[in-house]
Amino acid sequence: LVFGFDGTNVQPITTDEDGRLEIASISDSVTITAADLDIRDLCADNDNVLVFGFDGTNVQPITTDEDGRLEIASISDSVTITAADLDIRDLCANNDNVLVFGFDGSDVQPIRTDDEGRLEVISNITPTYTEEEAEDVTTDDDFTGLAYVDTSTQVMYTYFVYNTGANSADVRLDVSPTGEDEVFYIDVAARTLASGATDTFVARTFLRYTRLSYRSTTPTEPTILDIYFQSQSN
């Protein structure tokens, strides 16, 4: 408990229920009377305080060198410590430990670990969603690939294809380790989409890059495709 002095008696310093100091403001005017009042900048030569320490018998001024650094006298003799029930031993986890708590927003809770001492963590991860669109894509007689997408960090991704044209189209899914046009593997074989049909394509093999390829089912009979790539990553 901390006390202050009201000029006559010591009084406990009061706080509100949240532990904040209660300050009584001075509402009346305050008159200060002084003789030879000197308002000036402070000066080290005139305005200073000598700090003392206690040597066990008397108070002694604390000394510094000419640069103001404390002069410390090292203890060169042996030091004897006398204590009752002094126990010098190796620390032991069973006896010498600290329980660590966290705050759940309402109460403090002990932080949990598994039986091997590893923290038990509940992840709260919001997936990152991305989307790419290629609308009104016209098919040709030979397979044409969209630009490769780097899917190496995607946990889930799908190509959606909608045949909005009048003719059929063949659509397949390619994967590649390098993203080069000539270096690829047909991961999902070509499937035929009739006019007005939709389909989805998901890779079965992991390689860094993925793309969708398409062509007209019947040569010289092109069609129009709307293609959407949607993915989630952590």
Image (cartoon, rainbow, N blue to C red):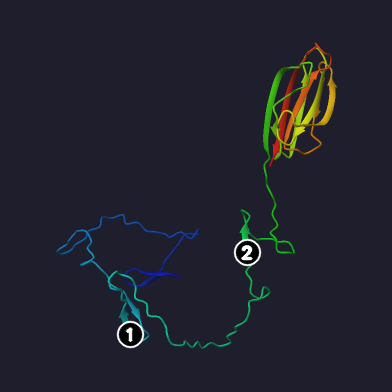
Task: Tell whether 178 sits left or right of 73.
Answer: right
Where does the image place residue 25, in percent across and percent down from the top left? 35, 56
Residue type (three-letter) at the residue carrying disc 1 = Asn
The picture quadrant where one finds residue 165 is top right
* Residue that label 1 marks: 58
Where does the image place residue 221, in percent across and percent down from the top left? 80, 11
Q: Earlier in the sequence, mark 1 or mark 2?
A: 1
Q: Is residue 217 above or below residue 110?
A: above
Q: Secondary structure at mark 2?
A: loop
Task: Tell whether 116 sits left or right of 16.
Answer: right
The picture quadrant where one finds residue 141 is top right
Nearer to the camera, 86 or 164: 164
Q: Pointer 1: residues within 10 angstroms few (<14), some, or many (20+)?
A: few
Q: Secondary structure at mark 1?
A: loop
Where does the image place residue 54, in percent across and percent down from the top left? 35, 81
Q: Pointer 2: residues within 10 angstroms few (<14), some, or many (20+)?
A: few
Where does the image place residue 147, in percent across and percent down from the top left? 69, 27
* Residue that label 2 marks: 100
Q: Is residue 82 above or below residue 23?
A: below
Residue occupying image coordinates x 26% and y 55%: 29
Nearer to the camera, 218 or 27: 218
Residue occupying image coordinates x 42% and y 59%: 22
| Outermost residue to the left | 36
User: Which quadrant is the C terminus positioned in?
Assistant: top right
Query: Between marks 1 and 2, how big is the CA–CA gap?
Result: 44 Å
Residue type (three-letter) at the residue carrying disc 2 = Val
Nearer to the camera, 215 or 70: 215
Report the disc number at residue 20: none
Task: Give the number of callouts.
Answer: 2
